[in-house]
């Protein structure tokens, strides 16, 4: 595993240099409008292939290594930040802490917001994805996982997974605490943070790193890249690979030469390895009969 981590680090460094050159060529003034989105490293429930959502699951050892590799790749790319954002879930918080430590940037101001949490998986929380596909069919599970506006089955409020039982959400009106969310719901709860804090900070010249989750990052890239409600179904975000956006003064993404498909951002990683990692995320809900 260590060898694989080292290979990934080296590939990330090579690709990072390319990304830096491409961005620098765009215009040095634009380098100020930097936004890096980083999905947390592998969590224990990623390893066990379980729907996670707002359940507060820790990183695995491999997840911590991914976070360190991400920090090294960002440092090698010459990225520097003025502030960081993360969710209130420890897999994202730990990923950010590890990456910032590798970058020597533990001092950065960090904002934690429930609005960057993973999409809430409702009554699917805790279930194995492949077993859920066996039971309900792969097509149904794909709709629950990736459609824009179809929510998963909702939780009852007496479930231990309902956020109303968790004191970190005590300051929030129970009406806005989700019992399950589709991606559209996730976009809608992230937008006040984007429009009220993150966007204005970037417009004022701050360079931000955001450690978040597969679906909260899908929500952000859908907004940034104006991705169609149908096309967002095909977007899967790999764990632990920094996705670097360069934004213009209107906060619209500037597409780079090595942008990733529909995304204008550039992954700091070997493109083939990143594509394989995204494909592996997609395949998590293949039925066990395959
Ligand atoms: O379980 C989850 O919370 C997410 C991310 O791990 O899964 P998926 O990729 O299936 O949306």
Image (cartoon, rainbow, N blue to C red):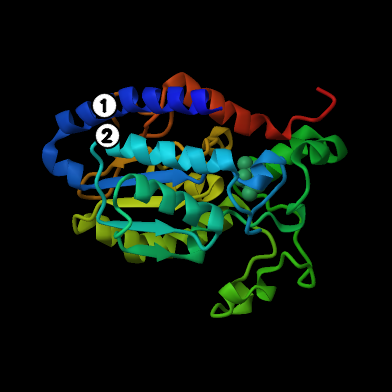
Quadrant assignment, res 19: top left
**Which residue ends up furthest to the front in the rendered image?**
2
- C-alpha span from label 1 to label 2: 6 Å
Residue occupying image coordinates x 34% and y 66% = 196
- Pick whichever, 276 or 178, lies toward us: 276
Q: Is residue 184 left or right of residue 105?
A: right
Residue occupying image coordinates x 32% and y 22% = 14
Per the image, the residue denoted by label 2 is: 77
Q: Position of residue 213 (x, y in %)?
A: 53, 49
Q: Is residue 242 left or right of residue 237?
A: left
Q: Position of residue 113 (x, y in %)?
A: 46, 65
Quadrant assignment, res 109: bottom left
The C terminus is located in which quarter? Answer: top right
Q: Is residue 147 visible?
A: no
Say above or below: 252 vs 274: below
Per the image, the residue denoted by label 1 is: 17
Residue occupying image coordinates x 50% and y 44% = 218
Q: Is residue 43 left or right of residue 143?
A: left
């Amino acid at each position: 595993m260590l060898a694989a981590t080292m290979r990934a680090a080296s590939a990330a460094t090579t690709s990072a240099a390319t990304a830096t050159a491409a961005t620098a060529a765009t215009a040095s003034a634009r380098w100020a409008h930097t936004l890096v989105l980083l999905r947390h490293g592998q969590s224990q429930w990623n390893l066990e292939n379980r729907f996670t959502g707002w359940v507060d699951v820790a990183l695995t050892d491999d997840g911590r290594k991914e976070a360190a590799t991400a920090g090294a790749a960002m440092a090698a790319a010459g990225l520097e930040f003025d502030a960081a954002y993360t969710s209130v879930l420890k897999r994202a918080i730990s990923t950010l802490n590890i990456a910032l430590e590798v970058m020597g940037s533990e001092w950065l101001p960090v904002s934690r917001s429930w609005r960057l949490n993973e999409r809430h998986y409702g009554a699917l929380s805790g279930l194995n994805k492949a077993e859920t596909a066996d039971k309900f069919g792969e097509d149904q599970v794909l709709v629950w996982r990736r459609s824009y506006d179809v929510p998963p089955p909702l939780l009852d409020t007496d479930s231990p997974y309902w956020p109303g039982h968790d004191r970190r959400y005590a300051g929030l009106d129970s009406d806005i605490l989700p019992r399950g969310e589709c991606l559209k719901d996730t976009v809608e709860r992230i937008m006040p943070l984007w429009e009220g804090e993150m966007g204005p900070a970037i417009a004022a010249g701050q360079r931000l790193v955001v450690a978040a989750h597969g679906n909260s990052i899908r929500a952000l890239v859908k907004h940034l890249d104006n991705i169609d409600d149908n096309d967002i179904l095909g977007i899967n975000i790999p764990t632990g690979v920094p996705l670097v956006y360069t934004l213009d003064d209107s906060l619209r993404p500037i597409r780079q030469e090595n942008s990733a498909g529909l995304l204008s951002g550039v992954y700091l990683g070997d493109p083939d390895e990143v594509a394989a990692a995204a494909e592996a995320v997609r395949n998590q809900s293949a039925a066990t009969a395959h």
